[in-house]
Image: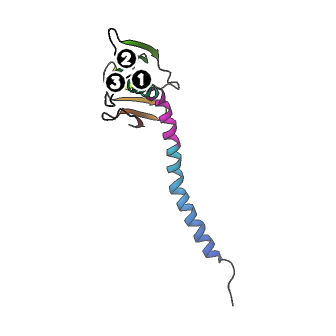
Amino acid sequence: MSRRGLTLVEVIVSMALIGIVAAVTVPAFAGLAGTDRDAATAEPVARLLRSARMTALREARVTTVVIEPVSGRYTIAVAGEGMPRRTEGLLALGDGARILVAGPRARFAFEPSGPARSEPIAVRGPGGDVAVRVDPWTGDVLVGAR
């Protein structure tokens, strides 16, 4: 006699296993969505630093960025012959986000050959703090949890 279908015990055990797997994985995926939103809060700072890095590489000149956390103002200076070319502006963070640095301002310097000097900086948003780091060897701008 051939058996067709599943017994009630087999169905209940299968459903219990699916429930356990779902209970473990759903919170992990929910945490990933929050991380993306938090990283997006820090994106204006990262975009500014990436732009300065590209300027240094493109123009073959040292490019510095100074960010004042309280006001959100920034200054980009491109070294040149004579006076450096300067650009000033205001970072638009939104959602009550604010910049966190160790001192009164954060300074970043991008070399034309790739390396960079930087200070620690983070952006505090609704989901927590997100660090914006600059790799000292390559000058790559990285955004991640603090």
Q: Describe residue 50's horizontal placement relative to residue 17 as left or right.
A: left
Mark 2 or mark 3: whose residue is earlier in sequence = 2
Residue type indicated by callout 2: Val
Mark 1 or mark 3: whose residue is earlier in sequence = 1
Q: CA distance from mark 1 to mark 3?
A: 13 Å
Residue 65 against residue 144 in the figure, above or below: above
Q: Is residue 77 magenta?
A: no
Q: Which residue is mark 3?
A: 108
Residue type indicated by callout 1: Thr
Going by the picture, which residue comes out furthest to the top? 82
Which SS class for mark 2?
Answer: strand
Q: Which residue is mark 1?
A: 55
Q: Which is closer to the viewer, label 2 or label 3? A: 2
Mark 2 or mark 1: whose residue is earlier in sequence = 1
Residue 122 against residue 71 in the figure, above or below: below
Quadrant placement of the C terminus = top left
In the image, which residues are magenta? 33-46
Which SS class for mark 3?
Answer: strand
